[in-house]
């Protein structure tokens, strides 16, 4: 994808302007409403700080989770996020508890240069008077227009929603005089482009996770770019089935066997499958048994991770790689007994010399963090779905909507 021509925050004169900024503050909260990981807030700070330093009036928009009922609005308010942002910025953040109307308009107009305002959860617009109307999520044109009317310029720094056309990204961009991308989106695009579009070779992709159906687009797009694709995780078992093997009780997508056959055929020599599997009697965290996957698997087991021989094979395949793109864990990392494949493969990638290493995909990024590998990668995308769609070669509407230089 060539997004080099998109205007960035630095191409816009922001001083004394009302700058609308779409950020991704969709952070995880515990039952008490405490933020459990503020990574997404800190990732947006460079853009917010730049705007403050350059005397913009900063008006922030974000969604938080999904809103399906009026009751959801009680627990999914951005109020605690405004407080956290205040602490991180060491400056007051005006929180406006509504998404439209006089209270919002007055607060925006009272804002001075260098001050920050956060609008309530944009997805509150998905439910109006108890009715599910999806004004935000279906990009209701009057809503994008209304929000755009509050400001002079628009910056999109929410990579996590870049693959969606919502009112708060595409809708605002379509209705405002000038727009650009923020520093986080700029970095995401630069790193994804480096990994996917202009990879140094040898280029090895590692795909895993639950389902073939989730990753077909990625396989399809990467197959003609990579030197090797290593396949692990639940999706591997559908590939074994495509080779004519029985896979016991393992995850199997019958309706994807033909697709798997097709990719094995056109990807001959490039697609590397596991040679053994770590198994349990059912979906449970118990000490594994192992089986080879060049034959039928035992009928009474479920494959939950790659086995030790595969770990060695994948380590060998990764040796000397100059670009590694990783999407999807090698096994069920939620289980202690089945995190080994992901951990070992992750460590191998992290220790590669002089390689550009990229993680896309929400669960892979979470697994890398949980296993303590996070800072050893060149880039871990903050947008699971958006990075996945980029890897599929799909256009990102949230970026497309931004003006060219
Ligand atoms: P990502 O979000 O990184 O794209 P996915 O959502 O595709 O990754 O996959 C993550 C999920 O895949 C995890 O919940 C993990 O438990 C599951 N998974 C991995 N290996 C297996 C397996 N062998 N059987 C069942 N589920 C698996
Ligand atoms: Mg996932």
Image (cartoon, rainbow, N blue to C red):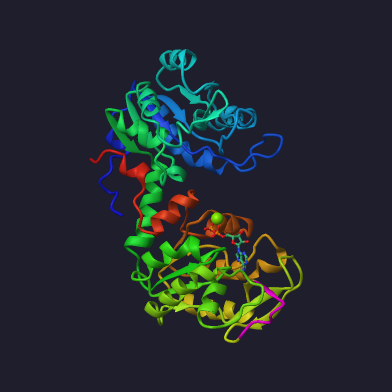
Q: Does the magenta stretch include residue 154?
A: no
Question: Between 110 and 262, which is closer to the camera in this rendering?
Answer: 262
Residue 128, position in %: x, y? Answer: 52, 25
Question: Between 185 and 402, which is closer to the camera in this rendering?
Answer: 402
Q: In this view, does 92 lie above or below 292?
A: above
Residue name at image x 40 percent, y 59 percent: 391
Residue 363, position in %: x, y? Answer: 57, 56
Mark yes or no: residue 9 visible: no
Farthest residue to the bottom: give it.
295
Q: Quadrant of the N terminus?
A: bottom left
Residue 121, position in %: x, y? Answer: 53, 30
Question: Between 347 and 304, which is closer to the camera in this rendering?
Answer: 304
Farthest residue to the left: give it.
405
Q: Quadrant of residue 21?
A: top left
Is residue 311 shown left or right of residue 4?
A: right
Q: Does the magenta stretch include residue 301?
A: yes
Q: Is residue 103 above or below residue 367?
A: above
Q: Is residue 186 above or below residue 136?
A: below
Residue name at image x 53 percent, y 42 percent: 40
Residue name at image x 49 percent, y 14 percent: 103
Is residue 219 shown left or right of residue 291?
A: left
Question: Between 56 and 227, which is closer to the camera in this rendering?
Answer: 227
Report the predominant secondary structure element of the magenta stretch.
loop
Give the residues drawn in magenta, as a range.
296-303
Mark yes or no: residue 114 visible: yes
């Amino acid at each position: 994808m060539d997004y080099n021509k998109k205007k960035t925050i630095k191409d816009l004169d922001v001083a004394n302007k009302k700058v609308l900024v779409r950020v991704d503050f969709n952070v995880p909260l515990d039952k008490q409403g405490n933020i459990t990981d503020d990574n997404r807030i800190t990732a947006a700070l460079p853009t917010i700080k730049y705007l403050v330093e350059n005397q913009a009036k900063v008006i922030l928009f974000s969604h938080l989770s999904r809103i399906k009922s009026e009751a959801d609005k009680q627990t999914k308010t951005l109020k605690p996020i405004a407080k956290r942002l205040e602490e991180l910025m060491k400056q007051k953040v005006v929180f406006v508890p509504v998404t439209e109307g006089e209270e919002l308009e007055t607060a925006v107009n009272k804002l001075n240069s260098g001050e920050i305002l956060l609008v309530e959860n944009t997805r509150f617009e998905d439910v109006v008077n108890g009715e599910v109307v999806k004004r935000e999520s279906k990009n209701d044109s009057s809503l994008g227009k209304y929000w755009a009317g509050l400001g002079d310029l628009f910056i999109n720094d929410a990579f996590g929603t870049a693959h969606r056309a919502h009112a708060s990204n595409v809708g605002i961009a379509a209705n405002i005089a000038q727009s650009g991308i923020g520093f986080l989106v700029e970095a995401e695009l630069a790193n994804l482009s480096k990994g996917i579009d202009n990879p140094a070779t040898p280029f090895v992709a590692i795909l895993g996770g639950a389902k073939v159906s989730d990753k077909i687009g990625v396989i399809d797009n990467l197959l003609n770019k990579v030197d090797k694709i290593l396949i692990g995780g639940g999706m591997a078992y559908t590939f074994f089935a495509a080779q004519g093997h029985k896979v016991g009780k393992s995850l199997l997508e019958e309706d994807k066997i033909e697709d798997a056959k097709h990719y094995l055929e056109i990807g001959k020599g490039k697609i590397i499958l596991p040679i053994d599997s770590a198994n349990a009697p059912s979906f449970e965290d118990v000490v594994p048994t192992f089986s080879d996957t060049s034959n039928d698997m035992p009928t009474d087991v479920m494959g939950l991770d790659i086995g030790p021989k595969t770990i060695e094979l994948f380590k060998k395949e990764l040796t000397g790689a100059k670009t590694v793109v990783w999407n999807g864990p090698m096994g069920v990392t939620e289980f202690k007994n089945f995190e080994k494949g992901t951990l070992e493969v992750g460590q191998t990638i992290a220790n590669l010399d002089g390689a550009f290493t990229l993680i896309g995909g929400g669960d892979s990024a979470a697994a890398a963090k949980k296993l303590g590998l996070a800072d050893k990668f060149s880039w871990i995308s903050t947008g699971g779905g958006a990075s996945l769609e980029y890897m599929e070669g799909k256009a990102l509407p949230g970026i497309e909507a931004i003006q060219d230089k």
